[in-house]
Image: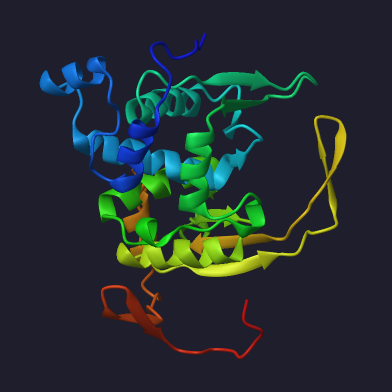
Amino acid sequence: EMKEGKGKRLNKNTLEKVYDNPFDARAASDEEDRKDLQEGRRTDMSRNRDFGYICGLFLAEGSFTDHGVAFAANILDSSIRMKLYNYLHSVFGNSLKIFVSCDKNGSRGCQFVINSQLVKHLFLDLFGHHTATNKQMCKKLMEAPKEFQAYLLKGMFEGDGTRTKKSLIHKKIFTFTTTSLQLAHQIQLILLRFKVVSSLSISKRKGKHTAFSGRKCPYNADLYNIRICDPGSFNIISKVLGFDIVKEKSKFHKPRYKFIEDNAIVCEIRKNSKII
C-alpha cells in the first residue's frame, strides 16, 4: 500500500532546482536526501534518469488537474506504479505528497495525483499545454543529454508504446503512439539522435467509439503512430528501452536511407502523397 510522503511541504526552492537544471542537478533539499547522497545511495546521475522517465511517462499518461498533475496507470501494473512513486520522491524529495485514486466503476484504472501548483507550472513550462493533442517538449528537453532522453523514451514507451511479439522477422516492430502531431515529430527527432529511423502514420479514429469496461467511450482525436521496423534501428531502440530482442537482417534488405549528419538522413522518395 502506498502512503503519502512525509516531511515538510514541497517548497518553491526545490522546484526551482529541478527547473534550472533538471538533467543532472540534485533537486531535493531535505536532510534525508543530503545524507543519502553523502553515503553514496543516490547520485545526480540517478536523478537524471528518474526525471527523464517521469517526463516520458507524463507525455504518455499525464494530465493536468485543477490543483496539480496526475498520471494514469493500470492498477495491476505494479512495476510502473512503483517506479513512478519512487522516482517522484527521488526527484522532488520525500516531502512530495502523492495520492492514489482508483476507478470506482470496477475497471483497472488508477491515477497518481500530485496536488501542487508548483509542479503543475513546472510541467506546463516543460510540456506546453493542458490538452493531450497539444503536448510538446520545450527546447530544454529537446536539447537534453542523450542519457536523459533515453529514459524519457523509456517512460513514454511504458506508457504509450507497444512491441509486436511475432516471431517472423518482418513482424518485429516497436511503436510509440500519441495524439499530438507536434510531439510525434519531436519523438522522431530524438530517435534520430540515437541513429534510429522511424516512420509516421495516422489512425483516423476521431469521432469513433470504443468499448471500455462495459462503457461506450468516444475517441476525441486521431492517433499518430511512430514505428521502428528497420533491423538496424530496431536493434538500437531495443537496447535503449532495455529489451533483449534482436531483429536479424534479411539478405534481401537494403537500407533506404543514409545518415549525412548525426541528426539528419537522406532517403529516396518512393511516392508523392499527402504529408502528415
Drawn side of residue 207 relative to residue 129, left or right = right
> Residue 162: x and y, percent?
54, 47
| Residue 223 visible in the shown view | yes
Question: Residue 44's quadrant in the figure?
Answer: top left
In the displayed structure, 43 sits above or below 6; it is: below
Relative to residue 63, is residue 105 drawn left or right? Answer: right
* Colour mapping: rainbow
Q: Work out whether residue 167 can be spotted.
A: no
Residue in the picture at 41% in, 50% down: 153
Q: Residue furthest toward the front?
A: 12
- Given residues 94 and 172, the one toward you in this image is 94
Residue 3 appears at what percent x and percent y?
Answer: 50, 10
Horizontal and vertical percent for residue 268?
A: 45, 89
The one nearer the camera, 251 or 88, is 88
Q: Eyeballing the image, is 116 above or below 138?
A: above
> Relative to 235, is 96 above or below?
above
Comparing 202 with 151, the one in front is 151
Residue 72 sits in which quadrant?
top right
Q: Is residue 53 above or below residue 132?
A: above
- Identify the residue at horizontal 28%, vertical 46% (top origin): 23
Query: Seen in the image, is 156 located left or right of residue 237?
Result: right
Total number of numbered discs in the rendering: 0
**Residue 252, percent from left and from top:** 40, 76
Which residue is at 48% across, 36% downward?
119
- Which residue: 59% across, 61% down? 225
